Image (tube, rainbow, N blue to C red):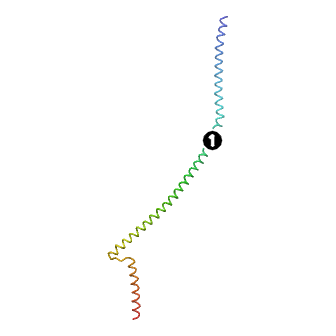
């Protein structure tokens, strides 16, 4: 009988240890299932919260971008106005210089033509006016006779 009692005592701690391992394994299993279930329930609300946060960030980002674009467009308009004003000024100066050059050119050409004996437009017009007067005078004289 001593052998039977001893055998029973040796088996009890082994069964007890196996029971404890099973108990811990079951607890770990239940903890995993619980975490999965909780993540499923809270995950949806967490994702919804992330979406709301993302929408807010997107709106504020769009506002900032719109403000930057508006500021850039304002600066572009100002620079464009300055460039147009400067262009007008430069254009006026160029036209003035071209007028001066043209006038100097006309004067030199007229002087050169006068030197070689070609009458100017003014000379031709004056001569034409005198010729008209003479023609009218001759016609009056011819009528009197």
Left or right, residue 84 beside residue 54: left
Compared with 28, 48 (above or below) is: below
Query: Extreme top residue here?
Result: 1
x and y, in percent, of residue 79 in the image? 52, 56
x and y, in percent, of residue 37 in the image? 65, 31
Residue 21 in which image quadrant: top right
Compared with 130, 56 (above or below) is: above
Considering the image in quadrants, where does the N terminus appear? top right
Residue 126 in which image quadrant: bottom left
Query: Extreme left residue here?
Result: 116
x and y, in percent, of residue 108 in the image? 36, 71
Left or right, residue 132 beside residue 39: left
Compared with 61, 88 (above or below) is: below
| Residue pointed to by mark 1 | 53
Q: Nearer the viewer, residue 101 or 27?
A: 101
Query: Extreme bottom residue here?
Result: 145
x and y, in percent, of residue 102 in the image? 40, 68
- At x 63%, y 41%, the residue is 53
The number of numbered discs placed on residues in the rendered structure image is 1
Considering the image in quadrants, where does the C terminus appear? bottom left
Residue 7 in which image quadrant: top right
- Mark 1 surroundings within 10 Å by alpha-carbon count, few (fewer than 14), some (14 through 19), many (20 or more): few
Per the image, label 1 sits on a secondary structure element best described as helix
């Amino acid at each position: 009988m001593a052998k039977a009692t001893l055998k029973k005592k040796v088996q009890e701690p082994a069964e007890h240890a196996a029971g404890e391992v099973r108990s811990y394994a079951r607890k770990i299993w239940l903890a995993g299932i619980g975490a999965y279930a909780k993540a499923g329930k809270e995950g949806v609300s967490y994702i919804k919260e992330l979406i709301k946060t993302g929408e807010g960030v997107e709106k504020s980002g769009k506002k900032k971008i719109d403000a930057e674009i508006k500021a850039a467009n304002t600066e572009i308009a100002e620079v464009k106005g300055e460039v147009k004003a400067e262009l007008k000024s430069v254009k006026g100066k160029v036209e003035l210089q071209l007028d001066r050059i043209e006038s100097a050119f006309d004067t030199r050409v007229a002087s050169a033509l006068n030197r070689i004996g070609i009458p100017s437009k003014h000379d031709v017009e004056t001569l034409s006016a005198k010729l008209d007067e003479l023609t009218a005078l001759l016609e009056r004289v011819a009528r009197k006779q």
